[in-house]
Amino acid sequence: MLGSLMNATYLDKIDKLSVVAMLPDGTAEAVRSSIQGAHIVAGQFPPETSQAIVQGSSEAFTAGMTEAMLIGAIIMAVTAAITAVLLPKRVTPFQEGKGEEVSYEGNPQDKSAVNPAA
């Protein structure tokens, strides 16, 4: 999902570059396919055109990555908030054979915090 978002942004920005519109179809398609393709194609043109292709494709790639990472960060933050709200604050595992539950307050690895449930 995030990769598709990144690619859509990249293509949108690439298609708006005037230098790409002037390229032959096969060459323009290589620029649209990936940032690596754009950099390879750029090496086949004079310095001014090459720099425009490299700069435009790098900016398009960065814009796509920025959007994808922002959406990913928002998804992670929302997921963390939901998890913090929904998970119980205390864990009370059943101890087989004891016939009672034991409550762990704080760190479950810290056995000094064990209190038999009332």
Image: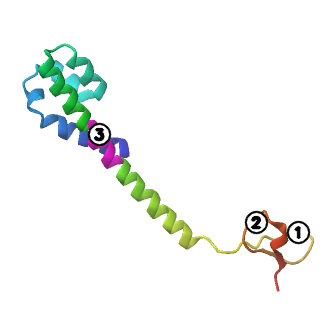
Where residue 25 appears, as percent x and y from the top left, is 13, 21
Residue at the spot 42% in from the left edge and 57% down from the top edge: 75
Other-residue count near label 2 (Cα within 10 Å), few / some / many at <14 / 14–19 / ≥20: some
The residue beneath circle 3 is 62
Going by the numbered disc 2, the residue's amino acid type is Pro
Question: In the displayed structure, does residue 85 sit left or right of residue 62?
Answer: right
- Vertical side of 10 occupied by 87: above or below: below
Residue at the spot 81% in from the left edge and 82% down from the top edge: 117
Cα separation, mark 2 vs mark 3, equals: 43 Å
- Vertical side of 21 occupied by 74: above or below: below
The residue beneath circle 2 is 108
- Vertical side of 101 occupied by 17: above or below: above
Residue at the spot 84% in from the left edge and 70% down from the top edge: 112
Quarter containing the C terminus:
bottom right
Element under disc 1: loop
Sequence order check, earlier mark of 2 and 3: 3
Please tell me whether mark 1 or mark 3 is closer to you in this view: 3
Question: In the displayed structure, does residue 65 sit left or right of residue 27?
Answer: right
Residue 19 lies in the magenta stretch: no
